[in-house]
């Protein structure tokens, strides 16, 4: 399965110069068939937005950490028009990254995803 890579966006740092459109966030439709992924450095914030008229779910896959624990964010439901921001655990620690990558699955392409890199 070749997951679609989510392009990360670096946000403007405090006191950084702001240009027209420089604070915009670009969302991409989730790949409901193959899933999505992004490389992780520990400064990422995943934002999911349900642009559809029906509720849909997202899942952030985890892997066993050094103590054998696994805690997926499983089937998190987004009502129509809902946003979700997910950062807890999206670090370079064991348990989330899989070979330096985070895996995200969405139920439908109406779920739009963006990954922001914090300065």
Image (cartoon, rainbow, N blue to C red):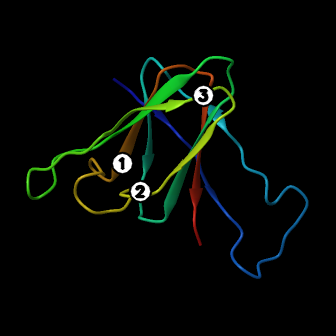
Which is nearer the N-term, disc 1 or disc 3?
A: 3
Q: Residue at left 62%, top 17%?
A: 54
Q: Residue at left 66%, top 26%?
A: 80
Q: Nearer the viewer, residue 105 or 41?
A: 105
> Residue 50: where, in percent of width, then height?
63, 30
Which is nearer the N-term, disc 2 or disc 3?
A: 2
- Relative placement, left or right, of 50 versus 86 is right
Q: Residues within 10 Å of mark 3 (few under 14, many from 20)?
A: some
Query: How many discs mark residues in the rendered view?
Result: 3
**Above or below — where is 33 with respect to 113?**
above
- Relative placement, left or right, of 66 versus 70 is left
Label 3: state its secondary structure: loop
**Above or below — where is 110 with respect to 63?**
above
Question: Quadrant where the C terminus lies?
Answer: bottom right
Instruction: Give me the disc on residue 15.
Output: none
The residue furthest right is 20
Q: Residue at left 16%, top 54%?
A: 65
Look at discs 1 and 3 and give the one toward the viewer.
3
Q: Nearer the viewer, residue 107 or 42?
A: 107
Residue indicated by mark 1: 101
Instruction: Kindly report the distance in space between the C-alpha atoms of the residues bearing marks 1 and 2.
Output: 6 Å
Q: Are marks 1 and 2 in contact (CB under 8 Å)?
A: yes
Which is nearer the N-term, disc 1 or disc 2?
A: 2
Question: Quadrant where the N terminus lies?
Answer: top left
Label 2: state its secondary structure: loop
Residue indicated by mark 3: 79
Residue indicated by mark 2: 40
Label 1: state its secondary structure: strand
- Relative placement, left or right, of 119 versus 98 is right
Q: Are marks 2 and 3 in contact (CB under 8 Å)?
A: no
């Amino acid at each position: 399965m070749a997951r679609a890579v989510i392009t990360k966006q670096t946000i403007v740092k405090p006191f950084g110069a702001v240009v027209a459109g420089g604070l915009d966030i670009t969302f991409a439709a989730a790949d409901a068939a193959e899933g999505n992924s992004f490389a992780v450095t520990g400064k990422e914030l995943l934002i999911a937005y349900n642009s559809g008229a029906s509720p849909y779910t997202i899942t952030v896959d985890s892997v066993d950490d050094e103590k054998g624990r696994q805690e997926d964010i499983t089937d998190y439901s987004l009502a129509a028009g809902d946003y979700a921001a997910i950062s807890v655990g999206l670090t370079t620690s064991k348990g989330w990254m899989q070979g330096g990558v985070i895996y995200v699955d969405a139920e439908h392409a109406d779920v739009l995803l963006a990954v922001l890199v914090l300065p």
